[in-house]
Image (cartoon, rainbow, N blue to C red):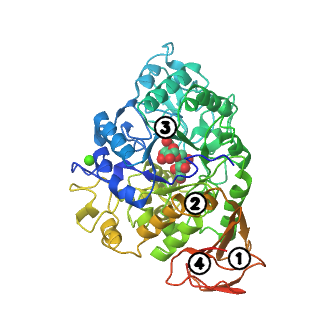
Amino acid sequence: MKKAWWKESVVYQIYPRSFCDSNGDGIGDLKGITGKLDYLQKLGINVIWMSPVYKSPNDDNGYDIADYQAIMDEFGTMEDFDELLLEAHQRGIRIVMDLVVNHTSDEHAWFMESRSSKDNDKRDYYIWRDAKDGKEPNNWGSCFSGSAWEWDETTRMYYLHCFSKKQPDLNWDNPEVRDKVFEMMTWWCEKGIDGFRMDVISMISKPAGLPDAPIAEGALYADCMVTCNGPHVHEYLQEMNRRVLSKYDIMTVGETAGVTIEEAKKYANSDGTELNMVFQFEHVGLDGGLADKWKKDKISLPALKENLTKWQKELADVAWNSIFFCNHDQPRVVSRLGDDSPVSAKCIATMLHMMQGTPYVYQGEELGMTNCPFGPIENYRDIESINAYHELTEAGLRQPEELLECIAYKSRDNARTPMQWDDSENAGFSTGKPWIMVNPNYREINVEKELADEDSVFYFYQKLISLRRRSQWSDVIVYGDYELLLPEDEAVFAYTRKLGEQKLLVLCNLSDKDVTVALPEGAAGEVKAILITNTAEAPELAEKVKMTKWQCAVYEV
Ligand code: TEU
Ligand code: CA
C-alpha cells in the first residue's frame, strides 16, 4: 500500500467559536487557538481541521459564508490567521480548512447579485425555479426543517437551499461557478494551508430535472439527502483535482453525507484522481440517521461492529477511511456509546484508534467531555435543533417534553459547549459571557485537572496518538490488515491488525458489565508486549478472557 503523511496523521478538529476566547467577547477566536497550540502539540496531533473561519452572518455558525477570502469579524483578522498558520507550522502542525462550497450565505455578493434580477450575469450561480401549481418546484425538505425552496419576491421565483434559507445552494453545473471556486481554493493553497475538509461535497451535483422524491412516514418533505452522489459529482471532483488539488501536497477529506461503500471507492480512490478520504455516516446513523434523528435509541454493538468492519475491509487497498465518532454535528460519543465515565471514554477511543484509517479527535473528546444538560429549548443555539423543535411540535407530530429529551440526547449543541480549560468561571474559555452555556461538569472535566493526573483521558489519548505516530507499532497500526473476531459478541469488540511478522490483538469490552470471552483458536498466542490498557492490569490472555466493564487492552502477540 502506498504510504502518505495524511495516512499516518492524527487530526484534531477545532470548532473555533467554542475553543478559546482571547478578547472576552464570549466567542472563541483565532488568537485563542494560537495561544493553545502548545497544548495541541503536547497531545501529539499533527493536523488541525478548523470549522469555517470565513466572513459569515453565522446563521449556521460559519457554514454560511459571505466572503471566502476574508476572516469572520468575531474570529479576528487575516493577520491573525497568518500568525496561526505560521505558529502551527513552526510546531509541525498542519492546518486544514473547512471548504463549504455546496452553498454560500445569502449575504454573499454572488447571491446578492443573482437575486437582484432575472437577467444579471450571476443569476445562474444559484438554482432558481418558477412556482409549480402555485407552490414550491418540488417536495424536497431542508435539512433544517421546512421546504428546501424559499420564495423571493424581487424576481418572483424560488431558490433552492438544502440547509437554512440563508444558505442558497450554488449551481455546480455552471462552469463559471466551478471556475470561481477553484480560483478561491488556489488562493488559499498559495497562502500555504495544508488541505480541505469539504462540507457536504457529495451534494454538489443535483439530480437532473430536480424531481420529487419519496416522503418517509411521519415526514412533511422528502429527505434533504436526495441530492447525494448526483450525476456529475465525480466529474466535478476530478476537475477540482486536476485544476487545484493535484498541484499541492495537501490533504483532502470529503464530508460525503449519504455515501455508500461503492461511492466511497470513487471519492477516495487510491489513484488520487478525487480526494484522499471521506467521512461516511452509516455508523453514526445506527441510532437514527438524518431522516429520523430525534430518537434516544442506543447503537447495538453487533451492528456497530458489522458496519465498521465493512468499511475496514471494503476500503482496504482501494481507498482510505476516516475514523471518527465525534465532530461538531454529533453528540459526545462518551454519552452516546459509553456511560460518561473516563474508563468508557478510553475504551471507545482504543476501539477507534487501533483501526485502519486517519483518526479525527474532536475538541474536548480527549478530555472525555460529555453531553450537556441544556434543559429548555431556549438554551439551545443550533438552528437544526431549534427548527426541528418548532416544526415538529407545531405540526403536532411530536410532544414537546419527549422531543426535548431526544434533542438533549442528539443535538449538535452537545459538541458545541465551550472547551473546558480549567475550573475557573466559564471553564477558562472566556472572561465574558459565553455565546452558549458551559457544561456544568467543567469543574470535574478540564484540561488543567487532566494534565495533573497521569491516569486522565488526556494522557490516554496522548498515548494512543504516540502509538500510531511514533512507536515500533506505527506501521502495523497505520497499514496493518484488519480482521474482526467474535462478530456475534454483544459486549466485546475484538479485532486483530497484522503487518508482516507483527500482529496486534485489540480487546474492548464496550459494556458496563464484567464479561468472559473465549477467543477463537490462534487469535491470542504468546504476549510479546502490552501496548495500552485502561485498567491497572490488562486482562490475562487465557482460554477464556475475563474483562471488567469498559476494560480494553492492546497486545502484540
Ligand atoms: O453537515 C452536513 C450534514 O449532513 C448535516 O446535516 C449533519 O450531518 C447533521 O446536522 C447531523 O445531524 C455539514 C456541516 O458539518 C454542518 O455543520 C452544517 O450545518 C451543514 O453541512 C451545512 O453546511
Ligand atoms: Ca473572542
Q: What distance separates the C-alpha of mark 4 from that of mark 3?
A: 38 Å
Q: Is residue 500 above or below residue 541?
A: above
Q: Looking at the picture, how far across and down is residue 204, in whole percent?
A: 59, 34
Question: Mark 1 near mark 3, Cβ–Cβ under 8 Å?
Answer: no
Tell me the residue at 33%/65% (across/down): 447
Which is more foreground, mark 4 or mark 2?
A: 2
Q: Looking at the picture, how far across and down is residue 446, in whole percent?
A: 33, 67
Question: Mark 4 near mark 3, Cβ–Cβ under 8 Å?
Answer: no
Circle 3 residue: 99
Among numbered discs 2 and 3, the one appearing first in the sequence: 3
Q: Amino acid at mark 3?
A: Leu
Ligand 1 contact, mark 3 (Cβ < 8 Å): no
Comparing 414 with 129, the one in front is 414
Circle 2 residue: 474
Q: Badge 2, how many Cα within 10 Å: few under 14, some, many 20+?
A: some
Q: What distance separates the C-alpha of mark 1 from that of mark 3?
A: 40 Å
Circle 1 residue: 489
* Quadrant in the rendering for residue 516: bottom right
Q: Badge 4, how many Cα within 10 Å: few under 14, some, many 20+?
A: many
Among numbered discs 1 and 4, the one appearing first in the sequence: 1
Q: Amino acid at mark 1?
A: Asp
Among numbered discs 4 and 3, the one appearing first in the sequence: 3
Q: What distance separates the C-alpha of mark 4 from that of mark 2?
A: 28 Å
Q: Secondary structure at mark 1?
A: loop
Q: What distance separates the C-alpha of mark 1 from that of mark 4?
A: 11 Å
